[in-house]
Amino acid sequence: MSQIYVLLGSLAGIAMLVGLSAIFGRWSRPVIQSPADAAAFMKAEYFRFEPGEAVLAPDGGAAIVADVANESFGVIVTRGDRWVARVVTPQTVRQVKLTRPERLRIGFRDFTMPSAVIAFEDAQTAQRWAERLTRALDAAQPSADAHERLDPRTDTAPESAGPETAGPATADPETTGEPDHA
Amino acid sequence: MPDLPDPIVYAIPGFVLLVAAEIFWSSRSQRVSFEPRDTATSLMMGLGNTVSGILFGFVGLAWFAFVAQFAVFDIGWVWWAWIVCFIADDFIYYWSHRAAHRVRWFWAEHVVHHSSQHYNLSTALRQPWTYVFTLKFIWFGTWLVLLGIPIGMVAFVSALNLIYQFWIHTEAIGRMPRWFEAVMNTPSHHRVHHATNPRYLDRNYAGVFIVWDRMFGTFEAERDDEPCRYGVVRNLGTFNPVRVAFHEWLAMIGDVARARSFGDAVGFVLRPPGWTPDASRETTDMIKARWSAQSAAQSDPQTPTGDDNPASAPAAPAE
């Protein structure tokens, strides 16, 4: 019985400290200020990464960075007050999908980060980046299921056109089913 | 045999007060920050560790009771045994901790402690739930009991060792006096241990006495020109304590299931984290070697970097 009290007391203590962290913890939502910031972060996280073109969410909460050396991409999303990065390779990615016309979802084979969702401002930009990611995955490892990585709905969307500099995107707080703080 | 209390139980209120104090201090400083979900995860991992100890602690105790029958000496509760036990326990802790970073089987458990990108006193409490499953208590816990030191004494000094390590998980303290930094593990030394900068990877395994790292070539001093980046090589994308607790175990099981030979399967378990038969992921040795080559190339542009074929290699593993 006393162990139950210890457990309850511990939970109360945890709640108190988490509350104090929220109020006094000097934390804030991280913002990726520029493509150069995103590139530098990917390079620091992945030693082999050679950053190229990048697209940022307008609120700076997410980014996609091209890896020119490996013909791949890196994805950066926020977790709490920090960033987390993953590379997009056939080994790491299960699926690239447009869940809405402007919303790109990348499913990872990663128990700690099942997916990342980036909401672009317009469907055309989302479609263009979905195709770019899928092309890179297919080129890296052509396979029977490679074409299934792209959601069928994208087939009806307009072909990408215009310059490769993508339009602004919006970081989606539902990125991995774990809501970000306000 | 004296009836010794569990020092950690008595230390817990102190832990809570010190974490609260550091949170308050963080609001006035620019050196520490707490993110509520990160704090929650760390504290829940600590609570789970305690629960795990209650549920499975008897396994270790049973083993020690068994081993004690074969003790070489009957040292008993003499005063000098406390000193011997404390120093020897810390020596064993060094090797146990080193193995926890160099053998994936042990890393699968220990990665939990390194999984926060923050470095504050709550990180000290981010402890694994699966200690007993690694059988570490057999490989590393047996020796002092086998020597003849009472089980209660070993358990007591091990707890003191862990309590000592609580206060070094902070950025609030810069450096201690030089004599102290030379002998003892300190916040500065342990920040290096938690850092993922290539220079700092797999360094400063000490528990209480940093001299073990100095003796065995694993010491690295914190540099003012290279701030520590905390976490693991591939940082976690979750605050879910269950995922934090088991992610590396699942990754390891998956690798073993997909192994093409028995040797590969054994390698996935006993070789360093990140090892693969085709070197398609990176171990810390590979990261450090690449970093060293690149650093050398930057200081001497004619030196080859050893980084000739990055395109063929996918990303590093989860950790």
Image (cartoon, rainbow, N blue to C red):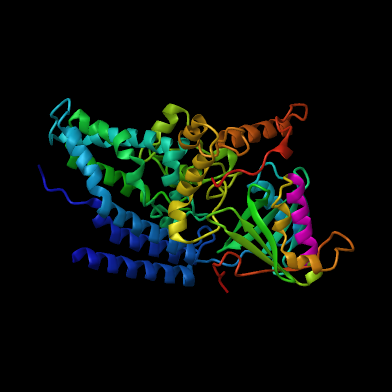
Against B192, residue A26 (above or below) is below
What's the residue at 50%, 64% (across, down)? B35
Look at the image and say whether residue A156 sits in the magenta stretch.
Answer: no
Direction from residue A114 to residue A125 in the image, left or right: right
Find the magenta span and give its range.
Answer: A126-140
Secondary structure mostly seen in magenta is helix
Relative placement, left or right, of B220 versus A149 is left
Look at the picture and state if B103 lies above or below A14.
Answer: above
Number of labels in the image equals 0
Image location of residue B291, percent across then percent down:
64, 36
For the N terminus of chain B, which image quadrant? Answer: top left
Q: Is residue B168 left or right of residue A121?
A: left
In-front residue for pair B182/B145: B145
Q: Which residue lies furthest to the bottom in this view?
A: A182
Which residue is depicted at the point 58% across and 32% down? B277
Residue A4, by quadrant, is bottom left
Q: Position of residue B307 (x, y in %)?
A: 71, 33
Q: Image quarter for residue A153?
A: bottom right
In the displayed structure, B77 sits above or below A7; it is: above
Report the residue that reaches farthest toward the front.
A144
